[in-house]
Amino acid sequence: MIFLPVQCRMARAALGLGVRELAAAAKVSVDTVARFERGDELKERTIDALQRALEAAGVEFTNGDKPGVRLTKAAAVRSAEAAAASKPAAKAIRGQATKAPKKKR
């Protein structure tokens, strides 16, 4: 299977990973991730390291008519749980900001 730069960007987005997090997981430099996503040529073992890091994080790569990515079931569950856990906190923060008393002049 061919691992494409666009798939790398899609996988990072699906996982909510930044370039720095992927670089650390793949044990490569931040510049290496950026170069790959720009389409620069890299060594095969470097590309393999990026792909393995994303797969370990819970991404499956597809190469049908159009290359794509999808989260594994375990990663999808983790993502849904993380989103659900962050919603009450966001509501509480918004609620605090809107309920603050206004100062009289």
Image: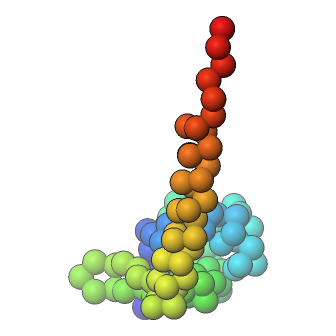
The picture quadrant where one finds residue 17 is bottom right
Q: Which residue sits at x=45%, y=91%?
A: 73
- In this rendering, the count of numbered labels is 0
Report the front residue among 72 and 2.
72
Image position, residue 72 (x, y; %): 46, 89
> Relative to 71, is 98 above or below?
above
**Quadrant placement of the N terminus:** bottom left
Image position, residue 70 (x, y; %): 41, 82
Is residue 93 rendered to the left or right of residue 72?
right
Q: Which residue lies furthest to the left in this view?
A: 65
Q: Which residue sits at x=55%, y=82%?
A: 78
Residue 74 seen from this side: yes
**Quadrant placement of the C terminus:** top right
Image position, residue 35 (x, y; %): 60, 62
Image position, residue 10 (x, y; %): 45, 69
The picture quadrant where one finds residue 2 is bottom left
